Amino acid sequence: MRKGLTNVLRSNAMRLVAVWAAQMLLFAFSGTAAYLLRFDFSLPSIYFRDLAYALPIWVVVKSLAFHFANLDKRGFRYVSISDAFRILCANLAGSAASYVVLLLVVPGRIPRSIYLIDFVFCTLGTTGLRVTVRLIRETIQGGQGGELEKRTFIYGAGDAGVTLLREIRNNPRLAYRICGFLDDRADKRGVLINDVPVLGGGEQAKELVANNDIEVILIAIPSASGLEMTRILELCHEAGAECKTVPGLGEIIEGHGLAGQIREVAVEDLLGRTPVRLEERQISPTIEGKVVLVTGAAGSIGSELCKQIARFRPAAIVGFEIAESPLFEIDREMRREFPAIPFYPEIGSVQNRVRLDEVLSQYRPQVVYHAAAYKHVPLMETHVFEAIENNVFGTFNVAAAAMDHGVDNFVMISSDKAVRPTNVMGATKRIAELILLGLQNGGTQFVAVRFGNVLGSNGSVIPIFKKQIAAGGPITVTHPEMRRFFMTIPEACQLVLQASAIGRGGQICVLDMGKPVKIVDLARNLILLSGLKPDHDIAIEFTGMRPGEKLYEELSSLLEDTVPTDHEKIRIFVGNGVPEEDVQTWLSSLRHICETRDTGRLVVALKELVLDYNPSTHLLRRILEHGIVIPLEVRETSNLPRIHL
């Protein structure tokens, strides 16, 4: 390693010496040429002595001017417009300083026109040298690769496209030969950008790709909306070219340049969601230096939460998880990516209060993020008691343990399915929200966070669709009008962190998720991303709605009050509070029903707790098929308190 460092230092020193030598020769040449030009290449002998005085002064003073302008450290091969302006200023400063020094050494003996001619020659020479080096380098690199380079169009002749062009030219490892720009703006057609023409718009892509033997189209429009990206992708596929894109500004800042981040077009690009603005200054005090516990830490949301939390330098993160192998994997991942943040994997179930007390007593967390839950709607329709035991009793166990052990902030992951639920999973999530509202007594601050479907999470449609495409289809969609709100896993976790900072206890935070997306459109876009054509290469079949599903999801009930926050994408819904003693009555009754495995009574209990819960036809039919009767007197004699939302 020491030898490699020595070689690097020696190489840098040699480059610096070469730059200084080249610049000094140019300074001397410019001064001599100025004298010769001034006297028509017939220099009188009386000026030989003045020239002998002037040359070393010009060389030394201008070298110092270039040094203080950092021009000797700026590579010739990356010269830019800003470098040219810096060279102009350095030459101006060097010429002015030389004039002052020479007035003191040889006062009045050097014609003033020589200073002007010298300045012009010196500026042209130092600028021209750098431009020549860059041209030679780009010419040499342009000749490398040859047939290995893919003939490429850049879609988008804006700032991102121009930056991408420059980086590709400067990076010989990127095997792209840029043959032209595509841009939908008519005023850019025919324009030359860095010697590359804007040939036409997306509508001409098919003809232009065929005429120029194009293999790849790089989409350089980071600000494009989801609809625009879908249209561009369709045009590129119709043209028969491979498509790739460059990331948005946030990814560029975190990465290492634009061209180095060329990637395949992702489904997130087609959704066109504006990234959540994260108020890090607001979040940091709630996490920095504190012990944080995450339940369900190995799940798709829980694991991303652990990574996002680690960015805010907590004292430690405790990962509580029932699944052994996934917990082992997230433990390894956290230790690899965040070695400075202690991560403690703890196996346990949220249904086991004794185990929860053990973990909280050992680590004394100040913040708890409760992500453990059963969330698959059709599965929970056939496992109603397990859904209650995990999502309701489990949430109460974690919340009660947090209160008993002095946790400051408790944030629960909820769901848009808790709004006017048509399935058991959504009803359990709504009851869990109400439990938190009921437990809010001024101590631990309880906040619930609602959001829609998460792209790429375990069991989401994206992985399922990808497997179906890989198998050659068909893609199965439940209904042509099925719509869902979507967000990315990082977005979901950022909302959770933001909610812990915004919430003041007894509140439900919701992200403004924009417009819902048709599932069938998502399926078509994924087929396009795979380089195939919907309904031609991959068929789409409609299978009918699954148990507990509804066509449209909602994020807030019309009966809830909406309160804005400082964050433009987060609003707070404040539901009706529930006395803590009523919460205990609920739980006692629900436990008795679960112990007796009385499905009919459970459905009635859920309906009475959540008045806008509408049991699915599948669940009611299953109850009737098993001969379970739901008598009216059950509703009349039930001791569960009625909660009007």
Image (cartoon, helix red, strand yellow):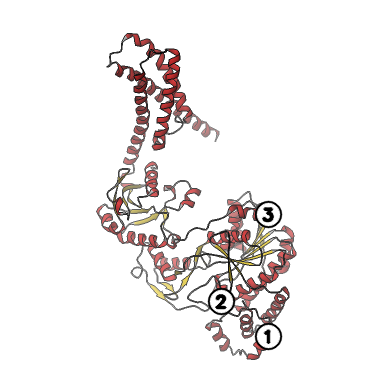
- Dividing the picture into quadrants, the one containing residue 238 is bottom left
Q: Residues within 10 Å of mark 3 (few under 14, many from 20)?
A: some
Q: Position of residue 614 (x, y in %)?
A: 56, 81
- Dividing the picture into quadrants, the one containing residue 356 is bottom right
Residues marked 3 and 2 touching at CB (< 8 Å): no
Q: State the SS at label 1.
A: loop
Q: Quadrant of the C terminus?
A: bottom right
- Read off the residue under disc 1: 638
- Read off the residue under disc 3: 290
- Read off the residue under disc 2: 421
Q: Residue furthest left?
A: 211
Left or right, 58 with respect to 289, comes to: left
**Image: 262 above or below 388:** above
346, 152: nearer the viewer = 152
169, 183: nearer the viewer = 183
Q: Residues within 10 Å of mark 2 (few under 14, many from 20)?
A: many
- Distance from the alpha carbon under mark 1 to that under mark 2: 21 Å
Q: Which mark is residue 254?
A: none
Q: Position of residue 410 (x, y in %)?
A: 66, 63
638, 115: nearer the viewer = 115
Q: State the SS at label 2.
A: loop
Q: State the SS at label 3.
A: loop
Q: Position of residue 295 (x, y in %)?
A: 64, 63
- Dividing the picture into quadrants, the one containing residue 109 is top left
